[in-house]
Amino acid sequence: MLLFANVGNEYGKLWDFWWAGSEQRLPPASVALLCIGAVVGTLIGYSGWWCRSVVSATSFTLIGVVNKCLTILLNVLIWDQHATPGGIFSLFVCISGGLIYQQSPMRGASGKTEETEGSGTASADVETVELMEKEQGQSSAQKRRG
């Protein structure tokens, strides 16, 4: 990116702009808003990485979908050029498909009890706990080796 800025003579343009007369410069409020926008954008990126590290991939995707739904809702309420009713309907069909999605059972899962066979969510919780215990065991073994 820095190479493209150099090829496009952006550094020279920045230097000329910085030393230009006061009538050609941006107002200080505009520069402050630009800096605030850069900081907020960076924080949004880091918060996305943090969120991804504390929730599952499925939950992170669901958070993204809800965010898109809120964005579309605001778009419909505020502006006159927005998604068509067919597009919004298609979005809700996709979301409905995601809501009824259920992870397939693990192959060779042993130790199923009567209370986990009756409910898909209970067996998924047991699988999640088993997976977390397995990951914690691996991480502690790596710490002992390191």
Image (cartoon, helix red, strand yellow):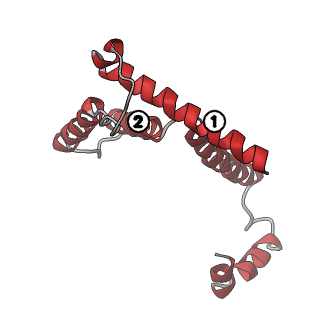
Residue occupied by mark 2? 62
Q: Position of residue 6 (x, y in %)?
A: 69, 84
Residues packed near mark 1 inside 10 Å, few (<14), some (14 to 19) or many (20 plus): few
Residue name at image x 31 percent, y 13 percent: 114
Label located before the other in sequence (2 or 1): 2
Q: Position of residue 129 (x, y in %)?
A: 51, 27
Q: Amino acid at mark 1?
A: Gln
- Dot 2: element: helix
Figure check: 81 above or below 2: above
Residue name at image x 23 percent, y 36 percent: 97
Q: Position of residue 54 (x, y in %)?
A: 59, 35
Q: Nearer the viewer, residue 13 or 84?
A: 84
Q: Quadrant of the N terminus?
A: bottom right
Residue occupied by mark 1? 136
Q: Is residue 36 left or right of residue 112?
A: right
Q: Nearer the viewer, residue 91 or 25?
A: 91
Q: Position of residue 34 (x, y in %)?
A: 68, 53
Q: Amino acid at mark 2?
A: Leu
Distance from the alpha carbon under mark 2 to that under mark 1: 25 Å
Which residue is the extreme one toward the left? 86
Figure check: 84 above or below 112: below
Q: Nearer the viewer, residue 38 or 69?
A: 69
